[in-house]
Image (tube, helix red, strand yellow):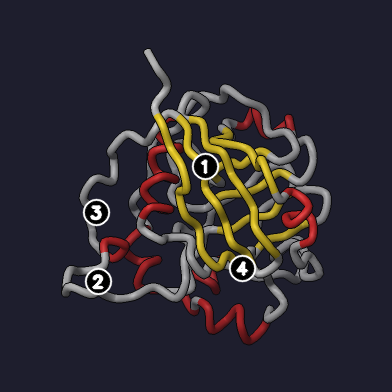
Amino acid sequence: MMARSCLYKVAFVGAFALLSACSRGVANPLLAPVPKGLDAAAPDSFLVQFATSRGDVGLMVYRAWSPRGADRVHWLVTHGFYDGARFFRAVKDFVVQFGLSGDTAVTRAWRDRSIADDSVRASNARGMVTFAKGGPNSRTTQLYINLRDNARLDALGFSPVGRIVSGLDVVDSLYMGYGEGPPRGAGPAQERIVREGEAYLAREFPKLDRVVTARVVQGWRAKR
């Protein structure tokens, strides 16, 4: 899947257990080809509370670090995108990665919804959260949490969007027994997650932890 020196993004989405329509009959925005407001500016900083299968994790996102990335995270979290997402790549002393959907229809809807790169304004230190990507201007929905200082990723253009401000011990406790994906390891293959979704992970990697819900719990704009 991804070499330790670079984080490749083979696929493009991250959420599972999604409803196909809202309660009032409006189409699920996660399945819309051009979701309304997708490019809207996020607050200057905002807190995302992740309830995971191991406990709660708080992520503070800073738009000044990565404007386009922060806007994308805010939209995705606001619309429940990460609910149910598996931590499909959990490599001890390196990163924990999530953001591939268990719903293959959502995968198809998001495969071309990439955003342009942001300049690297913060380092990939332990606890920093960054979009995975597979080349220039290819960020979509996958995020990784640095488990150690990975400053070498800065020069490769991986721009952190925020940092874990609570629950880093929870992140450290996520199941990491499967390790890296192929060809370097025997963990989940991203291309199979794309094709088969949650059924593949539940059948072959049942111990993987997951995001239960992710919600923006506070947000504000800096005074100017």
Residue ID for mark 4? 210
Residue sticking out furthest to the left: 25
Identify the residue position indicated by label 2 in the image. 22
The N terminus - image quarter: bottom right
Residue at the image position 58 percent from the left and 34 percent from the top: 160
Tell me what residue is drawn at x 74 percent, y 61 percent: 180
Callout in the foreground (1, 3): 1
Q: Quadrant of the C terminus?
A: top left
Q: Quadrant of residue 28?
A: bottom left
Label 1 CA crowd tier, 10 Å (few <14, some 14–19, many 20+): many
Image: 59 above or below 112: above
| Quarter where residue 170 is shown | bottom right
Q: Residues within 10 Å of mark 2 (few under 14, many from 20)?
A: few
| Precedes in sequence: disc 2 or disc 1 | 2
> Disc 1 designates what residue?
47
The image position of residue 111, as x and y in percent, is 37, 58
The local secondary structure at tag 2 comes to loop
Q: Indicate the position of residue 136 as horizontal and vertical percent values.
A: 47, 36
Residue bearing mark 3: 35
Q: Amino acid at mark 3?
A: Pro
Separation (CA) of disc 2 from disc 1: 25 Å
Residue at mark 1 to residue at mark 4: CA–CA distance: 19 Å
Of badges 4 and 3, nearer the viewer stands: 4
Tell me the SS state at disc 1: strand
* Cα separation between marks 2 and 3: 14 Å
* In the depicted structure, whether residue 127 falls above or below residue 181: above
Which of disc 4 and disc 1 is earlier in sequence?
A: 1
Residue 137's place in the image compared with 208, above or below, is above
Helix, strand or loop at label 4? It is: loop
Marks 1 and 3, the one that precedes in the sequence? 3
Residue pictured at 66% horizontal, 53% vertical: 2
